[in-house]
Amino acid sequence: MAQTIRRGGKAVRRAAAASGTKRKVTAARRQTGSVIDQIMQWMPFSEETLHRILMFMILGGAVVLAWVVASMAGVPQLAEAEMAMISAKSGFEVKRVEVRGVNRMNELKIYEKVLGQRDQAMPRLDIAALRDELLQLSWVKDARVSRQLPDTLVVDVIERSPNAVLRRDGKLTLIDETGHPLEDVNPAKAKGLLVLSGNGAEDRVPDLVHLLDTAPALRPQVAEAEWIGNRRWNLTFKTRQVLALPEGETESASALLTFARMDGVDRLLGGKVASFDMRSTDRIYMRVPGRADAAAAAVRAEASAKAEAATARTEAARAAVASAAPAKAPGSKTAQD
């Protein structure tokens, strides 16, 4: 039987290799398809939903990329400026400022901070930055800034309350209950407030308030408090009498309470004692002005009286001796004569 041989046909080896490669590709496709099918079966959504998710991701990436490019080109800033201009022309611009909650502090200091925001468009107003500036004022404890459309800026202020006066280097400074300085004042304006002195006294205000709360009956009588050696307190009452308290929070509170009880029984305040020293836990020392001088004068008077008595006794003895001796007659002679 005759066999026809075509010229240019593939060799046997090439044909076998091509056939093997085709089988491998087909097997790989089948295996990959089966793996993807298994994964799709595990997912809680269909293949169509997956296609949508991928499409949204692609679109989202395109939007983000467009926004980054626009930001680098300054498009958002231009749009914001344009919106602010449109708002200002529409009447949404700061024309009036309303300040609330100011009772003690100088209201002009708030207006100095806020008036710089006038004639600005409402959308461009930085509320947070303005609040931070207001919190830098010594009297402002808290502040809230809000827009009242179309043209009003409202500032609500919570003031600090003066609690005491700090005396240092001949100056008087108002401080609040935390020791925060408010402003320098003259003695007339500080009248009636507790006066603090001593290095670091302003940092110990909360501790002093807690100490005075131990004896509420004595608190209105305390005029001054001096922080001594960064260790303890000396209290000066309105009677100008001084009470020296011991070191330690518990020890000083106990001593003050004991003094309050003693004052309630014996009326120590307003008496002759100038100072009370309670630094020792088991006793109290009292100093009375002029008592030492009086004692010395009494000693001197007693010594003088004793000296005068001795002199008087000596003179009396001499007089007695003189009166007991016999008197001589005129012209008489002694026994020897």
Image: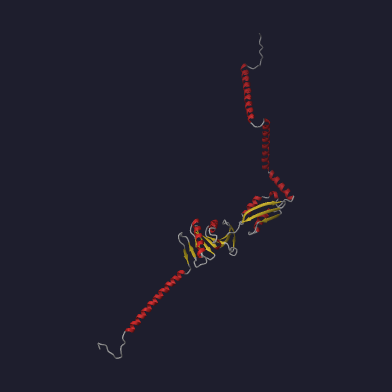
Q: Nearer the viewer, residue 255 or 183?
A: 255
- Residue 51 is left or right of residue 289, and the answer is right
Judged from this view, the residue extending furthest toward the bottom is: 331
Q: Going 63% across and 26% down the picture, which residue do you hit?
A: 34
Q: Residue at x 43, y 72 (%)?
A: 298
Q: Is residue 222 above or below residue 117?
A: below
Residue 128 point in image, percent of width and height: 65, 50
Is residue 69 or residue 214 the one in the foreground? Answer: 214
Q: Which residue lies at the image location 45% right of the left edge and 71% below the top edge?
A: 294
Colour scheme of the picture: secondary structure
Q: Is residue 274 above or below residue 71?
A: below
Residue 42 position within the rendered picture, expressed as x and y whole percent measured from the top left: 63, 30
Most extreme residue toward the left, as rendered?
336
Q: Residue furthest top?
A: 1
Residue 67 horizontal/vertical position (percent): 68, 40
**Residue 292 as seen in the image, left or right of residue 123:** left
Q: How many marks?
A: 0
Position of the N terminus by quadrant: top right
Q: Is residue 29 left or right of residue 244?
A: right
Residue 187 percent location from the top left of the image: 58, 64
In the image: residue 8, left or right of residue 205? right
**Can you say which quadrant of the picture contains the C terminus?**
bottom left
Q: Nearer the viewer, residue 248 or 200?
A: 248
- Front in this rendered view, residue 262 or 112: 262
Quarter occupied by residue 155: bottom right
